[in-house]
Amino acid sequence: MSQITIAIHGGAGTIEKSMLSPELEKSYLDGLRYALEQGYTILNQGGDAMSAVEMAVIALEDNPLFNAGKGAVFTHQGKHELDASIMNGNTLEAGAVAGVSNIKNPISLAKAILHHSGHVMLASEGAKAFAIQQGIEIVPDDYFYSTYRYEQWQEIKNTSTYQLDHQAKQEHQYSESEKKMGTVGAVALDSFGNLAAATSTGGMTNKKYGRIGDTPVIGSGTYANNKTCAVSCTGHGEYFLRAVVAYDVSCLMEYQQLSLQEACDKVVHKKLLPMGGEGGLIAVDTMGNFSLCFNSPGMYRGVKNNMGINEVAIYGQ
Ligand code: ASP
């Protein structure tokens, strides 16, 4: 069998060993391992990269520890507005959904938009109507409720602050630089040599005015192209939008012949960091090279291939 690879992330930020209890650390690592396995099994059975990234992201969306699907953060109005996107590197087809509510797995809605809507991106009520028409699973508001997310929102709900997903249950209020982003994503190379990328998020706690970040924007939060690589991002979306991060990695490979690692390093460390953009990305190319690259202290991440790599990790070096 030719090379197969899957990489996943569950958000980046200030995630340090001292901040997670051993039990919580284990829960995160188990969640990452489970999602990695869901995606890898599809690839190993000869399935395609699009199905692998969708399945890995569904596993992370269904896990309340991550800020996507079930674990999505609260908006200023006390709701959950979800963003997701998926891209096929073989066909350059893409599907995205922004600011939608009551969708159990926004990544599956993004995939349905890609295949059945004739469009790339649908938003809010229209996206929900399309989901109903497509038979996508709808869940009540309280499906997304968790005490931790609720308390997180209570802390800032009467302020004009909006914030990236916090670290798990806190003893103290973390400063702006101690934040973590809990968006989830996956990138894969299948046995046919095709690439795909998928990303899903609840966005930022207390967000208002229909704020949308980089996650559903093709080229910023998600991009895949068989000529170059597949990329899924996590971080402060406003910076990732302005830096057009995912497409920039691909462009550096396509137009400047940089390797995958060189391209990721350049964008994450040399471009984003000076702008103030904290976060990271996962990427894979058609040779099966992968990069789990971040400029924050940690990133929930994992990678598995059929050459003996099978790792999950949280903290930086
Ligand atoms: N990029 C996401 C956003 O800005 C947040 C994250 O990665 O956690 O909506």
Image (cartoon, rainbow, N blue to C red):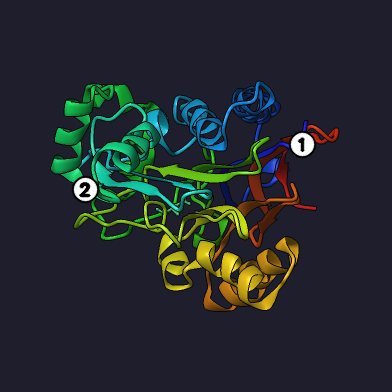
- The residue sitting at 39% across, 55% down in the picture is 163
- In the rendered image, the residue lying farthest to the right is 308
Give the mark nearest the N terminus, 1 or 2: 1
Which of the pair 126/228 is nearer the observer?
A: 228
Disc 1 marks a residue whose amino acid type is: Ser
The location of residue 14, given as percent across then percent down, is 61, 53
The location of residue 261, given as percent across then percent down, is 74, 62
Residue 102: quadrant of the picture: top left
Does dot 1 land on a helix, a strand or a loop?
Answer: loop
Is 55 placed above or below 91 here?
A: above
Labelled pair 1, 2 in contact (Cβ < 8 Å)? no
Quadrant of the frame with the N terminus: top right
Which residue is disc 1 drawn over? 2
- Is residue 214 visible from the viewing direction of this image? yes
The location of residue 183, given as percent across then percent down, is 48, 44
Mark nearest the camera among 1 and 2 is 1
- Is residue 183 visible from the viewing direction of this image? no
How far apart in space, not on screen, are marks 1 and 2 (Cα)?
38 Å
- The residue sitting at 39% across, 36% down in the picture is 107
- The residue sitting at 45% across, 62% down in the picture is 220
The location of residue 12, given as percent across then percent down, is 58, 50
Query: Circle 1: is it few (<14), some (14-19), or many (20+) Cα within 10 Å?
Result: few
Disc 2 marks a residue whose amino acid type is: Ala
Does dot 2 land on a helix, a strand or a loop?
Answer: strand
- The residue sitting at 27% across, 57% down in the picture is 211
Residue 123 got which mark? 2
